[in-house]
Image: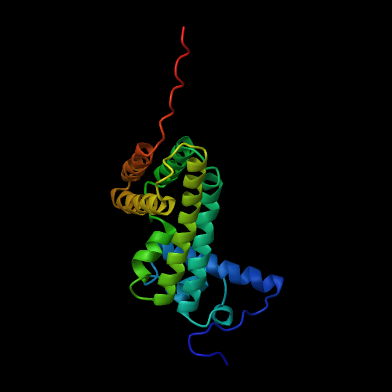
């Protein structure tokens, strides 16, 4: 028996069990992203995943447990999409390429549904402290990639060394999440493009201007 607030020990799954659990979480994640957590029922998850109620409750004690699994899956999905671009951030040009990839992604979807993690944050962080902690950890992990890229720019002498990478990363993340929300409402990628452009201009203002070598005496 676990103590209050403690998570039960992870159940060892067979390969088939792991696939079934994964199918349930994927179905729940897609439904919750489209309809919200409150707008998604366990019955809908059963139907969408092609499983039974007994299977669902075998893997998840209740909806809160399923939501926790969904947050973790959505975090993994977002980072899988972001990491290839974030790991290449070592210049302002690289930051621009990251911005362009995001704008293209949103434009292809006409801004629909918003950010997977941002949507969960809007709905859950004031209602569930465990969910808030998990979502905040995801944002911090995401920002750490941005901060690491900014530090690489500083090491290469491209950005003022006195700038705080963590603060700049938080500013970029705020622009991303705000831009996504406005893009979702407008069904257009333009708000995201404008928000990230403003954040990147702030970075460009910190760019170190290359000093010209003094001309040799004639």
Residue drawn at the location 44% of the way across and 66% of the way down: 135
Residue furthest to the bottom in view is 1
Left or right: 7 with respect to 212? right
- Where is residue 100 drawn, in percent x and y? 44, 39
**In the orientation shown, which residue stands out farthest toward the right?**
14
Identify which residue, 47 or 100, lies in the foreground: 100
Count up the numbered dots: 0
Residue at the top extreme?
A: 218
Q: Relative to 5, is 90 above or below?
A: above
Report x, y in % for residue 114: 38, 55
Instruction: Give 157 or 105, whichever is nearer the viewer.
Output: 157
Q: Whole-percent x and y of residue 167?
A: 38, 53
Residue at 39% x, 47% y: name it: 163
Residue at (51, 50) in percent of width and height: 148
On the image, the x and y values in percent for residue 177 come to 36, 54
Quadrant where the N terminus is found in the figure: bottom right
């Amino acid at each position: 028996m676990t103590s209050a607030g403690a998570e039960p020990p992870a159940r060892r799954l067979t390969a088939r069990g792991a696939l079934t659990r994964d199918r349930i979480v994927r179905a729940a994640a897609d439904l919750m992203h489209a309809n919200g957590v409150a707008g998604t029922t366990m019955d809908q998850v059963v139907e969408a995943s092609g499983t039974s109620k007994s299977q669902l409750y075998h893997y998840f004690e209740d909806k809160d447990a399923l939501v926790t699994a969904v947050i973790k899956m959505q975090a993994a999905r977002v980072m899988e999409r972001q990491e290839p671009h974030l790991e290449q951030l070592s210049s302002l040009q690289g930051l621009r390429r990251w911005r362009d990839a995001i704008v293209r992604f949103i434009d292809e979807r006409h801004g629909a549904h918003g950010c997977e993690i941002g949507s969960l944050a809007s709905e859950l962080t004031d209602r569930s402290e465990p969910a808030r902690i998990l979502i905040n950890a995801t944002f911090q992990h995401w920002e750490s990639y941005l901060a690491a890229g900014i530090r690489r720019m500083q090491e290469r002498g491209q950005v003022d060394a006195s700038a705080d990478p963590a603060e700049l990363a938080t500013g970029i993340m705020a622009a991303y999440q705000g831009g996504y929300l406005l893009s979702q409402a407008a069904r257009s990628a333009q708000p995201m493009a404008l928000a990230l452009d403003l954040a990147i201009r702030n970075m460009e203002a910190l760019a170190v201007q290359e000093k010209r070598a003094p001309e040799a005496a004639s």
